[in-house]
Image: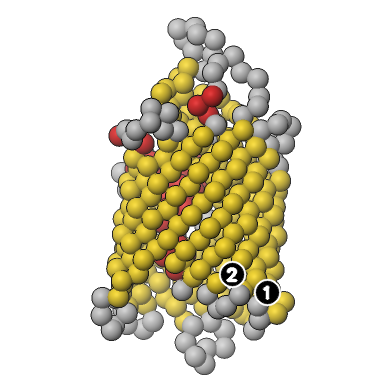
Amino acid sequence: MNILQKILLILLLIISCNTYSQVTDLARLEYTYFPQRGSDNSFKRFRALVNFPFKLDDKGSYLVAGLEYRDVRFDYEDFTNFDSSNLEFFKSFEASLGYTFKLKNDWRYAIKAGVLAASDFSSGKLKNDDLLLSASTFLVKDKKNEGVLKPWRLILGLQYSTIAGRPFPLPFINYWKQFHPSWSYSLGVPKSNIKYFITPKSAIQAFATLDGFYANLQNDLIVGSGNPNDPVADSMSMTIALGGLGYEYYFTDHLLIYTYGGFTIVNDIRLRDRNGDDVLTINDQNSFYARAGLRFKI
């Protein structure tokens, strides 16, 4: 695994579990379809999450409990000289707890910790290697007050996950600004975009983002025909970077439906050993990507 792949994988796995935007989502249902160019393989994912905010006082302090479920179906049709039946179904379950409160001068502080179980669950039960721990802390400067002609928001944070294999947290930054009544942009990871509101209820956007998944293989997979020196896969990961266009329709200020379509720039689907080194490249050809969902936000 080269340096770029390591950076993308670490960013994806940490930030996808701990972005500040997920704290503002009270509920989300989402479906992703990602066919694999040059083969009959395809990636399908159903995702559902809910966040339960509990008001602690009248000063803007909240405790936020979160649950997320992901069901992944990877149709692996390529010919192999080993049994690939356990590479088709993956699930992940995440539970998190966050705390946020207001500071002076429109700053807000947030801290969040979570535990994620991501695996093929081929044994039918949870194992220690399925578990990943994460923690994050954020400072948010939100200038959306009435009378602000060009609202903006800055998020500065540190995030840590045991999957990163590093004993220190990684920095995170995101900046959003509405520079015109109908236009806004966002710069950061895992998503940057520029958005235009066609009407008060509908918007289009151009975006660049990261997506993918990671899962433990409970029964280590010998990738080969049974020779003693055949490599052994311990996990499977998909890391993609893509750009595309999206559409959003707002039923209310808080409830919207969205659909995104694009083409991958980086497409990395691999089996890896316990050290995170590549065992087998399943597919690295860039391809079409589609995602749609329903979101209820604060």
- The residue lying toward the viewer, choosing from 78 and 85, is 85
Q: x, y percentage for residue 87? A: 53, 29
Packing grade of label 1 (10 A; few <14, some 14-19, many >=20) is some
Whether residue 210 is visible: yes
Q: Residue at x 51, y 51 (%)?
A: 47
Q: x, y percentage for residue 17? A: 43, 53
Q: Residue at x 45, y 57 (%)?
A: 49
- The mark lying in front, picked from 2 and 1, is 2
Q: x, y percentage for residue 202? A: 68, 74
Determine whether the residue tagged by mark 1 lies in a helix, strand or loop. strand
Q: Which residue is mark 1?
A: 202
Q: x, y percentage for residue 178? A: 59, 78
Name above or below for residue 78 compared with residue 136: above
Q: Residue at x 56, y 51 (%)?
A: 210
Single out the residue that lies furthest toward the front.
124
Q: Quadrant of residue 179?
A: bottom right
Whether residue 187 is visible: no
Q: Which residue is mark 2?
A: 256
Indicate left or right for 68 with 278 as reference.
Answer: left
Name above or below for residue 179 compared with residue 272: below
Name above or below for residue 279 compared with residue 155: above
